[in-house]
């Protein structure tokens, strides 16, 4: 017998077969003999209960998870301690135009970014992300001014 014959036999096994006799009558008879008249069949295995210690551990795990999620959410929503909630000192400075053409483009871009961030903060004053971006932009402007200063 080769592989092709085996495969053909396996395909033939997938075909539905009818039993030669009705099986339900013998099943019903066996059930009627096993159970007394009028008695309901019951599950022989009682439901398993978790020990109290496992319930306590499950509750503690859920509480710890909830505290972790709440702590992460609180940490993400509150602004950092060193972040000013109002516009920084650099935001009131006039536009700076360095004489070096290599720095002039960066100064224009940073000034435009600062003005756009200030406008966005006016629309959403409680946004910590915008406050962080504004502070970072102001730090970059100050660093650019220091790099353009020949004495610094």
Image (tube, grey):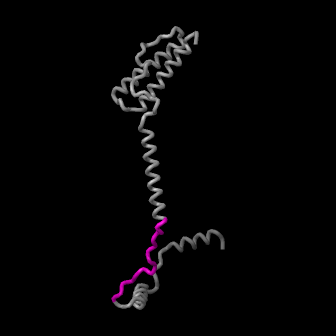
Residue occupying image coordinates x 62% and y 69%:
4
Residue occupying image coordinates x 40% and y 82%:
42
Q: Position of residue 95 (x, y in %)?
A: 43, 13
24 and 21: which is toward the camera: 24
Q: Quadrant of the N terminus?
A: bottom right
Q: Quadrant of residue 59?
A: bottom left
88 and 20: which is toward the camera: 88
Q: Quadrant of residue 74?
A: top left
Q: Is residue 29 above or below residue 137?
A: below
Q: Residue 125 lies in magenta, yes or no?
A: no
Q: Is residue 11 above or below residue 67?
A: below
Chief secondary structure of the magenta span? loop
Residue occupying image coordinates x 38% and y 23%:
118
Q: Position of residue 11 (x, y in %)?
A: 54, 70
Q: Residue 39 lies in magenta, yes or no?
A: yes
Total marks in image: 0
Q: Position of residue 134 (x, y in %)?
A: 44, 25
Q: Which residues are magenta?
A: 38-53
């Amino acid at each position: 017998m080769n592989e092709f014959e085996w495969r053909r036999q396996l395909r033939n096994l997938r075909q539905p077969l009818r039993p030669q006799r009705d099986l339900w009558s013998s099943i019903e008879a066996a059930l009627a003999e096993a159970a007394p008249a009028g008695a309901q069949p019951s599950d022989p295995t009682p439901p398993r209960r978790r020990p109290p210690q496992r319930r306590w551990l499950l509750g503690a795990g859920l509480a710890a998870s909830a505290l972790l999620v709440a702590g992460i959410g609180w940490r993400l929503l509150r602004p950092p301690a060193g972040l000013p909630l109002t516009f920084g000192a650099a935001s009131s400075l006039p536009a700076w135009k360095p004489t070096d053409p290599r720095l002039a483009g960066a100064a224009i871009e940073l000034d435009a970014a600062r003005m756009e961030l200030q406008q966005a903060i006016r629309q959403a004053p409680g946004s910590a992300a915008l406050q962080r971006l504004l502070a970072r932009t102001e730090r970059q402007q100050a660093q650019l001014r220091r790099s353009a200063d020949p004495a610094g």
